[in-house]
Image (cartoon, rainbow, N blue to C red):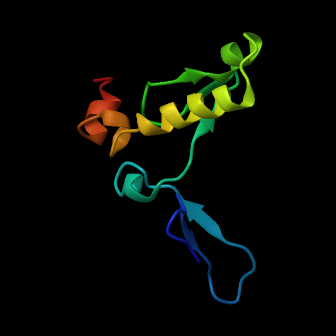
């Protein structure tokens, strides 16, 4: 049921309709195949949900950035993405705010 870039493990019970998915990002991180980004409510873009690095699309747009400049900002954000866990050493270090 899952593709290489799926963040949840999807289960389906034979004979029943529907599926259920579990996101086990701490115990079974999927960083190596993650192709997602988050746009926050205040206009920041994050390349990793665990990371603290953000770029402000809102501010760039308010300053009149062109489409090419916005694309470069997004590309720069993606290029700073860490290999795993937003640059944290372990799931425990995320929980401890390290």
Quadrant where the C terminus sits is top left
Q: Nearer the viewer, residue 39 or 94?
A: 39
Note whether 66 is above or below 5 in the view shown: above
Q: Relative to 38, does residue 35 appear above or below in the rendering?
A: below
Q: Residue at the spot x=76%, y=12% of the render?
A: 62
- Whole-percent x, y for residue 89 in the image: 23, 37
Vertical comparison of 78 with 21: above or below: above
Q: How many marks?
A: 0
Residue 12 is left or right of residue 84, and the answer is right
The answer to which of 9 and 74 lies nearer the viewer is: 74
Left or right: residue 98 versus residue 69 is left
> Would residue 69 appear left or right of 3 to someone viewing this image?
right
Residue 40 falls in image quadrant? top right
| The N terminus sits in image quarter | bottom right
Q: Position of 16 compared to 86: left or right?
A: right
Q: Is residue 28 visible?
A: yes
The x, y position of residue 36, in whole percent, is 56, 48
Position in image of residue 69 (x %, y %): 65, 26
Seen from this angle, which residue lies furthest left? 89
- Examine the rendering and report whether any part of residue 47 can be seen: no
At x 56% / y 73%, what residue is drawn? 2
Residue lying farthest bottom? 15
Pinpoint residue 43: horizontal percent, then vertical percent.
68, 22
User: 86 or 20, which is in the foreground?
Assistant: 86
Q: Identify which residue is drawn at 50% across, 32% down.
A: 77
């Amino acid at each position: 049921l899952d593709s290489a870039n799926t963040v949840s493990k999807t289960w389906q019970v034979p004979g029943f309709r529907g599926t259920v998915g579990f996101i086990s990002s701490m115990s079974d991180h999927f960083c190596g195949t993650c192709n997602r980004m988050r746009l926050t409510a205040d206009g920041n873009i994050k390349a990793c949900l665990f990371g603290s690095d953000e770029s402000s699309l809102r501010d760039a747009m308010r300053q009149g950035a062109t489409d090419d400049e916005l694309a470069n900002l997004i590309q720069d954000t993606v290029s700073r993405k860490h290999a795993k866990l937003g640059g944290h050493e372990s799931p425990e270090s995320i929980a401890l705010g390290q």
